[in-house]
Image (cartoon, grey):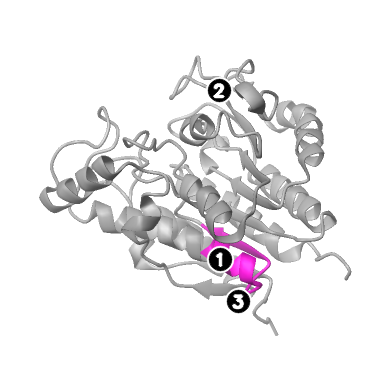
Amino acid sequence: MSTVSPVVSVTIGPEIAGYGFPDGHPFGTFRMGAYWDEAQVQGLDRQVRVDRPVLALEEELLRFHTPEYVRKVREQSVSGAGYLDYGDTPAYRGVYEAAAHVVGSALAAMRSIMSGGCRRAFVPIAGLHHARPERAGGFCVFNDIGVVIRSLRQEYDIRRVAYIDIDAHHGDGVFYAFETDPDVRFLDYHQDGRTLYPGTGDASESGEGAALGTKLNVPMPPGAGDVHFMQRWPQGIRFLQEAEPEFFILQCGADSIAGDPLTQLRLSATLHGQVAARLVTMAEELGHGRLLAVGGGGYNPHNIGKGWCAVTSALIRTPMAQE
């Protein structure tokens, strides 16, 4: 008989499922269902604690975003007209509430980890890593990752945060927000920016000022698969271990899996699970076990289901450290 794990929380509900764009936009509202349907087939839904989405307060959004931008999203959420960036991220009626639920759910998962309510958590519709403080970008309205990092500092005095991103697209909204912050270890494996949006994330971008050397960008050529990734993974592990992070955030975008309609990487769902398992093990070795996984991108329903379930399975099965 399956039992609910006290270790892993997964956030599921219509409030975050509704974060998606209309009129055939690739970031549609099918994405949470693609994951959760597969999770039920695999029986993962019976092995986790299912949490409901939470709405972020405006004051929480303002930890990362400018007042002018938050007001703009509110206004265009009422009208449903126009774009929130330069043409990738359209407004629609209710977009403010949907995006604020993404942020609030990531915050609630982080707080549950910090309070001991769970050891690890996964928020599938989150990881909106392109949003900048003053604008949307690349289908991302509010940057839940940035809000979580700022909230870890403000609420728990957590300084050393590791952010790991295996989405096909470079996490520019996170990178540039924390480019000068030496306490944020930024590790990003992505398709070379010369061939894919947003065009950033060159290996030479390694942080600025006191943070020089605390960011590691690993651009990969179109067509790169598991072998290419794994040749470069030990470097990333050493880079993270040096920092002894107090909290891990994994953005596990399924658009890096072979067959995505918008990208050209050829990673596997299995690799996504392997990455998650190694990070959980590292967190456990450090004695705290804190890891928040967020879904990120992915536009092939099959890949979303398989990739995110591989991550969820890794969160469930990786053992806790012995006390």
* Residue 85 visible: yes
Q: Which residues are magenta?
A: 109-123
Query: Residue drawn at (61%, 56%), measured in percent from left and top?
Result: 292
Of labels 3 and 2, the one closer to you? 2
In front: 48, or 303?
A: 48
In front: 148, or 170?
A: 148
As shown in the figure, which amino acid type bears the numbered disc 3?
Arg
Name the quadrant of the C terminus: bottom right
Q: Which mark is residue 46?
A: 3
Q: Which mark is residue 201?
A: 2
Distance, label 3 to label 2, CA atoms, is: 39 Å
Mark 3 is surrounded, within 10 Å at the Cα level, by few (under 14), some (14 to 19) or many (20 or more) other residues, namely some
Q: In the picture provided, is 50 more to the left or to the right than 43?
A: left
- Return the residue at label 1: 111
| Residue 72, image x, y percentages | 20, 43
Is 23 magenta? The answer is no
Of labels 2 and 1, the one closer to you? 1
As shown in the figure, which amino acid type bears the numbered disc 2?
Gly
As shown in the figure, which amino acid type bears the numbered disc 1?
Arg
| Residue 143, image x, y percentages | 42, 45
> Where on the picture, by quarter, is residue 235?
top right
Quick one: SS at disc 2? loop
First in sequence, mark 1 or 3: give its number: 3
Distance, label 2 to label 1, CA atoms, is: 30 Å
Distance, label 1 to label 3, CA atoms, is: 22 Å
47, above or below 286, in the image = below
| Residue 203, image x, y percentages | 64, 18
Query: Residue drawn at (60%, 57%), measured in percent from left and top?
Result: 309
Of labels 1 and 3, the one closer to you? 1
> Where on the picture, by quarter, is residue 57?
bottom left
Name the quadrant of the N terminus: bottom right
